[in-house]
Image: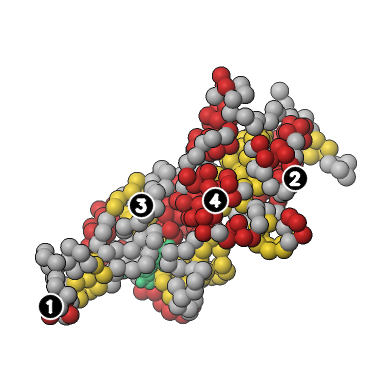
Amino acid sequence: MSRPTATRANGSRMDPAGGPLAGRHVLLGVSGGVAAYKAAALVRGLLREGATVQAILTESAARFVGAATFEGLTGRPVHTDVWADAHTVPHVALAREADVAVVAPATANVLAKFASGMADDLLSAAYLCLRCPVVIAPAMHTEMWEHPATRASVDVLATHGVELVGPASGSLAGGDEGLGRLVEEDELLDVVRRLAGTNGGGPLAGKRVVVTAGGTREPIDPVRFIGNRSSGKMGYALAAELVRRGANVDLVSGPSHLAAPGGARVHHVETALEMREAVLRLVDDADIVVKAAAVADFRPADYHKQKLKKESDEFAEVVLTRNPDILAELGERKNGTLLVGFAAETDLEEERGRDKLHRKGLDLIVINRVDMADAGFGVDTNRALLLDVNGGRTEVPLTTKARLATMVCDQVEDLIERAGEHEGSDDL
Ligand code: PMT
């Protein structure tokens, strides 16, 4: 049966079947906050773009906005209860039919449940069954957003490969102002469009990509090592985004507490030499290498099998030797592989970045700040300057690492397309 053609408020006709989300099935989870009313507007936006929308309301959400509102808008029954129609196993069935899932607004309670794997209601049980891209838009009071418990949930969710959008700053419930407001509908629609449209059909689909992440550890003795503060978050976010775009991803990771991004093959290494060995083994089959790892430039020249006594001279005089520069080595032996390097800098100095881009034979370099609390090592956010081999320059102000990963992937796709155009013109 064909979808009805809707009429806009101004009388003009719109054909949802032709919208950017045509044929896409969006699962919308709504949890209990004042912003739940905005989810109804989001449904309209999704329908306008051609999506079919299936809503799941938590019990608390239904106290803010009735299920009838969502049923009327979506034209589908709204689910709130894991026990209703239990024979259809709704948490599994609803998750399986989704191309993209959006949870908006997501309360602190929902973030905590998702992060801990609790599944005591339909929405949290469905979350565990989702295998499609997931967008989560938190909304709550500033105090709740800033509480260490919520920060911990957000950190864990980042390891699930979900895309967190917001919250924004502005008016909150009870007349308060601050960080915690649900982001605007347009911002959410942008993310949904991107995730729905780039789920395997773009220039990265089928490309073999090696991503490095995390820091290396260079052992002194069985107890101590020289290391750095890299958590792996940047590299893991890149791997997750590349998988989402249909790439075939090998993730070479230094020690990290992060969960492996679904769909990527993870190769665990500890030292720079092990990372080099793994990368060189994988690179011959790779179309693209993305080096987000913080590789130790030096290692102890000697490894002591016995724990060094702290008063020993050997400990006071650990001699260092230089590690190989893996990226420079890849640049030297480059054979059609697209190379993306990172540079950890205390400023976004363009000239030095360009020099590194050319010296290491890179196609793209991501220079990121490591001297600010909200960028670089360990945190979920970053600030960067992207320079490409064609002279392109993109400054990225404070954003999430997940978002920066999408921007890096966008640029890689541009580079692939430009390379394709070049090949085409050579043939003429
Ligand atoms: O893991 P997170 O906590 O999320 O932090 C992310 C990050 C800050 C580590 C990441 O975004 C980043 O900047 N990674 C590169 C850090 C770095 O080593 O920068 P560099 O300027 O020293 O090295 C430049 C490039 O050469 C990097 O791509 C690096 O992987 C590579 N390199 C460096 C040394 C070496 N011996 N071999 C290399 O391949």
Badge 1 element:
loop
Residue 71 lies, in percent from the top left, at 74, 31
Q: Position of residue 398 (x, y in %)?
A: 56, 67
Name the amino acid type tagged 1.
Ser
User: Residue at horizontal 65%, vertical 46%?
Assistant: 104
Amino acid type at image mark 3: Leu
Mark nearer the N terminus (1 vs 2): 2
Distance of label 2 from label 4 (alpha carbons)? 22 Å
Q: Amino acid at mark 2?
A: Tyr
Question: Mark 2 and mark 1 in contact (Cβ < 8 Å)?
Answer: no
Mark 2 vs ligand 1: CB under 8 Å? no
Location of residue 170 with respect to 103 vertically, above or below: below
Q: Which residue is mark 1?
A: 312
Q: Mark on residue 163?
A: 4
| Residue highlighted by disc 2 | 37
Tell us which disc is closer to us: 2 or 4: 2
Q: Which residue is pictured at 29% across the width and 52% down the height? A: 268
